[in-house]
Amino acid sequence: MTEKKTNKLKILNDPIYGFITIPNSLICDLIDHPYFQRLRRISQMGLSHLVYPGAHHTRFHHALGSMHLMQKAVINLRFKGVVISDDEANALYIAILLHDIGHGAFSHALEQSIVSGIDHETISLKFMNALNDEFNGELSLAITIFTEKYHRKFLYQLISSQLDMDRLDYLNRDSFYTGVAEGNISSERLITMLNIQDDNLVIEEKGIYSVEKFIVARRLMYWQVYLHKTGLVAEKLLGKILTRANELALLGEKLPASKAFTYFLTHQIDESNFTLETLKTFAKLDDYDVFSAIKEWISHEDKILSKLSESLINRKLPKVILQKAPFTKAQIDKICQQVKKTFALNDAELDYFVYHGKIQNQAYDVTKNNIQILYKDGAIKDVTEASDHLNLQALSIPVIKYYICYPKK
């Protein structure tokens, strides 16, 4: 029996926070595991680098940053007298470290095309369970907290709520790498203002302005970055490429691709047949597989796959119109007829070149894990009631916009 390697790595350097400390050898070993190392090859922001050239950071960066903020949150809450055992603290670090481990190549595009009927949260849990078996049950408490089955509710809220360590990290990180200053928030102050009341995560009254800035920053980042119309059309285009490739592969067409990618192109995968073997294959699939295959598909004889692939690789993206009102049937039909005529497409082919839909964002949801403000007298109010910011209530209303994408002439 070989002796288990002792991992000596304890400190990492991060451009956002400076030095990040790895708290123990178990977390070192989890970070070193191939399942987690795969996140180095998964873009945090999908194809947003086609809009913001600096946005090349990865899920690996984000996971480590979230864990770092969780360590700060535990230190702060303990300082305020909240009892958190060492086992609970370690479970929080593991859960937040692995919360995004189930993201596929280019994140959401894969979920909407060749791996359907199963989301990244479900795949993350499958990875956690597989790692728990491998690490002899040492992740059991982390999984219990992650699945909201632990008796202390606030521990789950630190991982997943409207003011969790995940959001605090990605807003600052994405703001930094895109250069969009509006997303820059004071995560340090927000964490310092955290407290617990009746087993719920709350923000002390003096932190209310930091919460207001946080909610406004979310809104600005979503419409300026995450739902930017060029990023939107690029992601939709990628989805169309994957859907076409999947369609051809299921018909028996040989497509150049890695073994892992070929497996998902030639099988219809959903939650019912996502086995442990499927998970192991999924763990070998990343952005590199997808992009290298799409480069090869430019020269494929299928004109649809070739044209779509060339469009993405060379950033010759379709035109996208984004507006507040839905497109009328007459508007859509007019565009469809023009595209059919210009590019000599039939109705089946047209679906790959003209697509429309809607996008929605809600900066703050008053109905789900809402942000509560704690007053000195022990009273608690929802942030929208506590705030004197006139627009905060408005930010809790969902904003819907409609898009249509079609080829440029």
Image: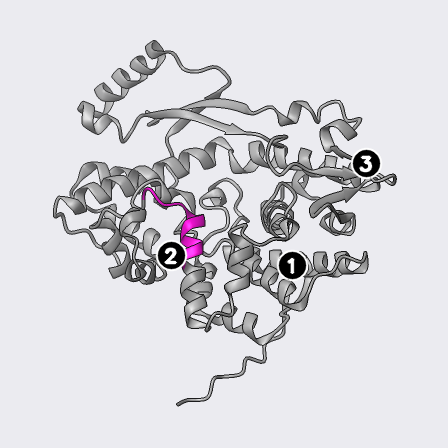
Question: Label 2, on which residue?
Answer: 286
Give left or right: position of 103 versus 259: right
Q: Which residues are magenta?
A: 116-126
Q: Earlier in the sequence, mark 2 or mark 1?
A: 1
Label 2 secondary element:
loop
Is residue 282 positioned above or below 318 on the image?
Answer: below
- Looking at the picture, how far across and down is residue 129, in whole percent? 43, 62
Label 3 secondary element:
loop
Residue 345 visible? The answer is: no
Give left or right: position of 66 versus 200: left
Is residue 101 positioned above or below 55 on the image?
Answer: below
- The CA distance from mark 3 to mark 2 is 48 Å
Quick one: 392 or 246, which is closer to the camera? 392
Is residue 244 positioned above or below 137 on the image?
Answer: above
**What residue appears at the point 80 percent right and 26 percent down from the top-left corner?**
388
- The CA distance from mark 2 to mark 1 is 24 Å
Question: Label 1, on which residue?
Answer: 15
Is residue 55 positioned above or below 402 on the image?
Answer: below
* Quadrant containing the C terminus in the rendered view: top left
* Tag of residue 379: 3
* Quadrant containing the N terminus in the rendered view: bottom left
**What residue appears at the point 61 percent right and 31 percent down from the top-left corner?**
365
